[in-house]
Image (cartoon, rainbow, N blue to C red):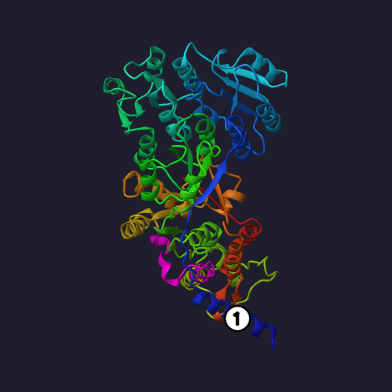
Amino acid sequence: MNIKVIKVLGFFILICLIAIFIPPKVIAKGITERIGGDDRFEVSVNISKKHWGEGSRTVYLSNYVAFADALSAAPLAFKDNSPILLTYDDRLPNVTKQELQRLKASRVVLIGGKGSISEKVQNEIQSMRISVERISGADRFEVSANIASKIGNYEKAVVTNGLTFADALAIAPYASRNETPILLTKKEEIPKVIQSKLNRVNETLIVGGIGSVSKSIETDLPNSTRIGGQDRFEVAANIIEKLELHTDRVYMATGLTFADALTGSVAAAMENSPILLTRPTALPTTTSSIIKNRKMNNFLILGGTGSVSSNINNNLLKTEGLKTPVVYFVPHADDEVLTYGVDIRNMIASGRKVYLVLLSKGEDSGARDIQNGVYDVESKTPKLAGKPIFCWWHGVYHNPIEEKYLHGHISQAEFAQARVEDFFRASLALGVPKSSIIDESFYLMDYNSVTAKKVMEKYISLYPNADFRTMSEYDQHDQHAFLGKVLEQLEAENKVAKYQTKYFVSIYTGRFSGVSLNEKKYAVTLTKASDSSFVKNAIESYKYFYPEQGIYANGYHSVAIQFNSLEEDMRSVFHY
């Protein structure tokens, strides 16, 4: 049989298999991971090993029982991208010393005065050829103020009671990510050293009820808002609700001691994860309620079973994950694979319904010129009309007549329709049901922030509880970037909550542009290794070159290097 005929038959068989594929219904149960240890020193070291596997130049060191000095440390440690480790007051634990060596630390910052961490410990660290700095003060309040000075410029501050630890720990990941200092106060009086720091801010966030920070203090603070609760567990839950924090992954720590949550707070901030607090053997009612209401089902437990029992772990494993849909706003055909493909497969694998909404026909792509073998008057550079253009992928100058293209010389309108068909074919290959693949695409002359906003508003109205994902506003392709700006505008207008949105970085921007984004980025890999076959099939669909049927390998004629890069390294990258 003719090889070309075999290829065509194979292509049709694949399309039929894709079209009838119905992904199995999956009920996403809870996922738990524990970072434990024999004691709090070992827990802090294991957190460090997990999140600073390649080392850290700087390490913050805190006394293992003196919570007061350390409460404000997390935002500064996060700013330095550094772990927090623990020590005795008069000696350095062996496990901590070994971790400093593994990290290849060259700088240790001691939190607290010599009563918290003695000169003996300082000398021991220096004997390891590690420089030592100390942030201290006359009391916990001055330590807090001095840490704030190290953070640098800030216009907002968190204010919380310095005589208890739970409220400060629960807000630490949020404060860290926003480079907001945590300033400690007394219940009825703001210490003078703290007031001097508050004089420079124009907004304050009080964490804790009036039993922690009184009404009189609240009225004295600039532009203050409060997140309170009946107890520390409710305060932690309310932080998530009031600040609309993402809960894709949630850290869980005992609310009865400070050490695990303290040393885990920087890692939680790195993952943009909040911290919930629990009793050692049973989840408090408010904690259980927010887990249920927000459909949380991915937890990292800090501490051993003495801090958070196996019973709690087992209960978390029974939680059902989100069943709300995920809507992807796709700028061009091929972005559903290149940018979102890995994340789409993960959402399907978790049992969530996905919708792919295409917004642009992408008729201006230079791939059309390559396929035609010559520039024309519809090209981006019409002055080149009539000039041949070489196809490096096939190693030829294409000739639509000799190669019997279905459309002959491909017009922009014909190319646009072919790209939309690509979008459907690749989305099916990813395992997305046909009913969830939606064409809302505009020609370039009508594709702008106004029309895109109307489409986004439509799907936000249709699926108000969904998560919404689009391209980063920092993407190096303008037709990608403005979608991120539009969704952020809808956030600002309170039409969609912050915890419902994610912004993805294209492969070109992330891997080839050389541009460094200011935002903290997160890489997503496949949760099921077998799902790589779906991504590979979707990539393969962009290689299909059956010109007699009007299928022109648009993706590979445009960005072959990006498809190849994804096939070699399957991950999506996003920021919040």
Give the residue at x 61% y 27%. Answer: 59
Amino acid type at circle 1 is Ile
Magenta-tinted stretch: 424-447
* The quarter of the displayed image where residue 202 is located: top left
Mark 1 — residue? 401
Q: Residue at x 55, y 14 (%)?
A: 113
Q: Residue furthest bottom?
A: 1
Q: Is residue 165 above or below residue 349?
A: above
Residue sitting nearer the eye, 492 or 111 = 111
- Is residue 375 visible in the rendered image? The answer is no
Query: Residue at left 36%, top 35%?
Result: 235
**Up-down relation of residue 483 to residue 401 (above or below):** above
x and y, in percent, of residue 171 in the image = 42, 33
Q: Quadrant of the N terminus?
A: bottom right
Could you tell me residue 541's position as x and y percent?
Answer: 58, 70
State left or right for residue 382 relative to residue 360. Answer: right
